[in-house]
Image (tube, rainbow, N blue to C red):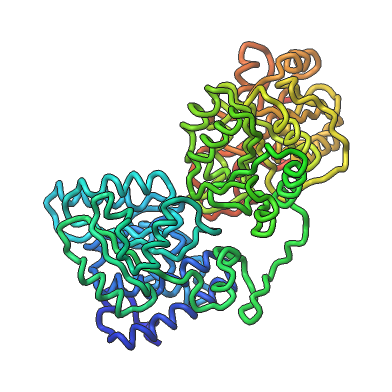
Amino acid sequence: MYLESINQPFDVKNLKVEQLKVLADEMRQALITKVSKHGGHFGPNLGMVEATIALHYVFDSPKDKIVFDVSHQTYPHKMLTGRKDGFLYEEKYDDITGYSNPKESEHDHFILGHTSTSISLACGLAKARDLKKEEGNVIAVIGDGSLSGGEALEGLDFAPELKSNFIVVVNDNDMSIAENYGGIYQNLKLLRETDGKADCNVFKAMGLDYVFVKDGNDIEELIKAFTKVKDSTYPIVVHICTVKGKGYELAEQNKENWHYTAPFDMETGKSLFEYNEEDYSSVTANHLLKKMKEDPSVVAITSGTPTVFGFTDEKRKEAGSQFVDVGISEETAVALASGIATGGGKPVYGVYSTFIQRTYDQLSQDLCINKSPATIVTFAGSVYGMTDVTHLGLFDIPMMANIPELVYLAPTTKEEYLAMLDWSIEQTEYPVAIRLPGGKMISDSKEVTKDFSQLNTYEVTKKGRKVAILGLGTFYTLGEETLKLLEEKTGVQATLINPMYITGLDEKLLEQLKEEHDVVVTLEDGILDGGFGEKIARYYGAFNMKVLNYGLKKEFLDRYDVQEVLKKNRLTATQITEDVMKML
């Protein structure tokens, strides 16, 4: 096996072309085997095997710096840069991350997990090289799906200003996570159809030179192209056309479903996990489709991740023009939602918590200053969400809850969520965001009659004394557990409150709590600094009320164990009860 003998990129250079083709087959099989057992990004990595081999055959990493966009296609790169064991041996699968990481290897230059960044980052490396009068190639690798992001276009726009060596490899597989949308993809399609010879060429229009590779899975053609541009003295784009999912028939046939996958049976492709339970994604899509049929002004918006709120290919077709994918352009999604709302439409933007971070300015400037009554539904904003350091969903509460005019809501059940969603879509006064709970969806079948237009009015779900527990969103159930344990341990029957509103204080209720309570406990599924609990603590700062805030420490966690993190932050009913007993 050739792959077993590859310990550094230089080893690739010692192989002949026919041997490189065998190496590609071995790498592809290692990818399929590992992901089938471990899960991970599948289609993007399978499509980049030959291109990665060719890059390391021609260029001299780490002197020549290769920057991968979003890291969804870095598994082959890791195999060739001393990390093959993490793909060959099951006991070592967790030794490497799923993303680019300089802590792992000198051949990685940034920790990357969000999209459209590689060109701008690589521009910076090239500029630093030129300032220091050093040598070496700088190569940015970016998928066509990432080109819709504003930062990618800004990077392309700036690149010609370098006037020195700078290479952009555009991996064009005619896909984002789902299908591509937008004018730039029409041009890529034209370039593919004309073998790169069309007069209309977005890259040339930006002042970049251009090389086209029709078969981006042909090692020989790739080596020729990369050799041609190596040590170039001007910025240039190498446009390669690859097959997403190449080498695994099911992934080639259904590219969207195989972008990322949980463990599966290699023979049948069947997932080893059953996902038959209703969840917030499917609930959202079904509810919005019903609303769309009743009201043609309702529109669902995604920024390249349609299934985050349940819009599979079938449901996108059902929604028709009432479903909009702006590509991986979160900023445009928020601004578009603001414009639609201002124009009398009823937009709902579904987005992962980790990606809403990318659009802070639009939330503030385009949406909230204008008080546009758009709806944002935030998914995976939870300690129970994605655990990679680049995809944490722990920071949205401090970020969003402190923007004026925004109403940020935290339901605890399916029924509360749908009631909030209905209210938000129909009201015309405020921009509204809804933060879905983490973990398994809870449905209690209770009718929700609350008038959400009465802002910042919390719900007392159990009246007690001495101790008041405010369980926000996901952690409302932790509040229930704590209340029960506290009564068992001390006999104290505490008050339990469902705040629902992240963005404001129920001052009337907080005043009432002073009459019969000595301790207030806040529980939130996010970073404490700047979060919900601090607002409560600040309110009681001038009074003789003891306040205990529970949430997560401000830090970048990576591939963490949820239960360990909860214990470390004293986010268990036992630990909270212990702390309250000390206060009493």
Question: Could you tell me which quadrant the C terminus lies in?
Answer: top right
Depicted 251 relative to depicted 460: above or below? below
Residue 470 vs 314, above or below: the answer is: above
Q: Position of residue 5 (x, y in %)?
A: 35, 82
28 to the left or right of 544: left
Q: Percent x, y for residue 487?
A: 85, 34
Name the residue nearer the viewer: 477 or 325. Answer: 325
Q: Residue at x 22, y 49 (%)?
A: 160
Q: Position of residue 349 (x, y in %)?
A: 61, 41
Instruction: Using the image as rendered, state which of residue 395 and residue 494 is in the foreground.
Output: 395
Q: Is residue 359 above or below residue 22?
A: above
Residue 528 visible in the shown view: no
Give the total number of marks visible in the rendering: 0
Q: Nearer the viewer, residue 401 or 347?
A: 347
Q: Residue at x 81, y 40 (%)?
A: 415
Q: Where is residue 367, by image quadrant? A: top right
Question: Please, which residue is most extreme toward the top here?
Answer: 542
